[in-house]
Image (cartoon, grey):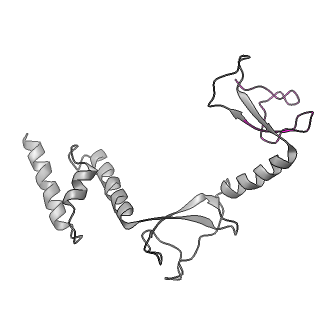
């Protein structure tokens, strides 16, 4: 249970001040309750609280307002699977955090990791829609995936698996 602020009669909020000047940060909800039945609390001095507040607002973007960076190669906003100069692929904008200039942080991945995630996403979507057999897994698809990225043979293999599973 959360201890109540004696001034307001409500649970403490981040920034509430104690008599000694310390500021409330948060309740420790993951730990066990204390002997008195309340959650533990985190308090800090005013200087450290201001530092925490600045850092928190920089890394956590509650308003979700920011600017999207421009890809220097295409001169357009980054788009999924755009390549960076070092070969990594753009995955997404991290809209929950901003860099010091107010831009969304960028998430990049290697081609192999990107490719695996794309296949995993397709497996999960197609299994939930009942399009693919349940026993098809990521490792199997990676093994049979065509090296030349021509999908026709992969579709034939998956269709063949689906028919065989219906017959069983």
Would you say residue 8 sits in the magenta stretch? Answer: yes
Q: Give the main secondary structure, helix, strand or loop, of the magenta stretch.
A: loop
- Image quarter of the C terminus: top left
Question: In which quadrant of the rendered view does residue 33 lie?
Answer: top right
Corner quadrant of residue 114? bottom left
Closer-to-camera residue (8/35) = 35
Q: How many marks?
A: 0
> Residue 74: percent from the left, percent from the top?
49, 82
Q: Is residue 12 above or below residue 165?
A: above
Identify whether 156 is placed above or below 10: below
**Residue at position x 47%, y 78% from top?**
85
Task: Tell me the quarter of the image containing the N terminus.
Answer: top right
Residue at (59% x, 64% y) in the render: 105
* Place of residue 101 in the rendered image (x, y in percent of width and height, measured from the top left): 70, 69
Is residue 20 shown in magenta? yes
Q: Residue 70, position in %: x, y? A: 56, 77
Whether residue 61 is visible, yes or no, is no
For the residue pair 107 and 125, the one nearer the viewer reads as 107
* Residues in magenta, as a range: 1-26
Q: Residue furthest left?
A: 167
Q: Is residue 56 visible?
A: yes
């Amino acid at each position: 249970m959360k201890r109540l602020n004696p001034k307001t009669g409500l649970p403490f909020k981040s920034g509430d001040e104690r008599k000694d000047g310390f500021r409330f940060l948060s309740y420790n909800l993951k730990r066990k309750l204390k002997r008195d039945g309340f959650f533990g609390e985190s308090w800090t001095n005013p200087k450290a609280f201001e530092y925490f507040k600045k850092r928190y607002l920089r890394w956590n973007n509650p308003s979700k307002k920011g600017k999207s960076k421009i890809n220097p190669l295409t001169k357009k906003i980054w788009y999924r699977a755009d390549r960076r100069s070092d070969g990594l692929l753009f995955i997404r904008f991290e809209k929950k955090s901003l860099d010091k200039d107010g831009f969304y942080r960028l998430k990049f991945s290697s081609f192999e990791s990107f490719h695996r995630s794309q296949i995993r996403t397709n497996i999960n979507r197609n299994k939930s829609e009942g399009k693919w057999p349940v026993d098809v897994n990521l490792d199997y698809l990676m093994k049979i995936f065509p090296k030349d990225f021509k999908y026709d043979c992969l579709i034939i293999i998956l269709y063949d698996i689906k028919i065989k599973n219906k017959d069983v």
